Image: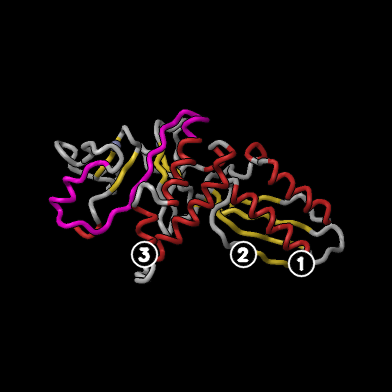
Amino acid sequence: MYVCQLSFECELDIELDEAQQAISMLLDQYRYNGQIIGREFPLTLIDDKFEITFVCPEQDSLAVKYNNEFVLKAFEQLKQLGLSTPKFTLKGLECQSDFSDTCDQPKALVLYSTYVQSCSPLRCLEHFAPVPLYKMPEQVRKPLIKWQESQAACDQLQMNEITEIEPFAIEQLSQLDSELLQNGNAIAKTIQQQINIPVYQYLYRVGGESLEAEQQRLCPSCDGDWLFTKDDQKEPLHGLFDFKCDECLLVSNVSWDWQ
Ligand SMILES: [Zn+2]
Ligand SMILES: [Zn+2]
């Protein structure tokens, strides 16, 4: 991913609050469209110039061709307020994040995120690299961001062992019929219908009785054999997924308690 900067000159005398609100609106719309990543963006005002720094999945994420109508509306509002057309600067490579997937069209995707992850929650199943959301059908982009926020909240609660609600958080992350995973499933189905790419879902797994019992687990949807690490495929897929059902499009791990 790449660190980028936008700067806006104030061309008219404008209220600071109004300008800040309009810039926040643009950043929200960019974020919901997958063009910028994360939630907090340092905004500075020096003399008559606002500067915002943020992270993009690709060098050309802010190219006009990726803008949707909401991004365009936010730009229109900035213009009406008297802010200049922004100047874009590519600052450099963001060293700590994953590179976006380079497939023209991934063969399969997986919906996977964690409490620390801010990149796209959709990854190419072959390379496990995040796929920028503006390359997905428009109607799933914002729902995916909202899904990722909820997923991160549940994952954070169970990581921090907030005992009173931990069981509920784990249920959301691991049970196929939970609201979170049902929402994810609806998004996955839309993608499949629109662009004909299968989308796997990840089922988080903790607990269980023993390693042996874990390895004998069956797919929770079809009761089929879904162990990925049997035979000569000893390594979990991408070091994470011990189970994979190609019928039900599900992946999972041997319980974290038995690894
Ligand atoms: Zn790929
Ligand atoms: Zn299955």
Mark in the foreground, 2 or 3: 3
Instruction: Name the residue tied to disc 3.
Output: 158
Instruction: Name the residue tied to disc 2.
Output: 42
Q: What stretch is highlighted in magenta?
A: 191-219
- Residue 113 in the image: x percent, y percent? 42, 52
Identify the element where label 3 is drawn.
helix
Q: Residue at x 65, y 50 (%)?
A: 29
The alpha-carbon separation of the residues under discs 1 and 3 comes to 38 Å
The disc at residue 248 is none
The part of the image, by quadrant, that contains residue 135 is: top right
State which tag comes first along the sequence, 1 or 2.
Answer: 1
The disc at residue 17 is 1
Q: Does the magenta stretch include residue 214?
A: yes
The alpha-carbon separation of the residues under discs 1 and 2 comes to 16 Å
Q: Residue at x 33, y 48 (%)?
A: 203
- Residue 218 in the image: x percent, y percent? 22, 42
Q: Which residue is nearer to you in this view: 14 or 10?
A: 14
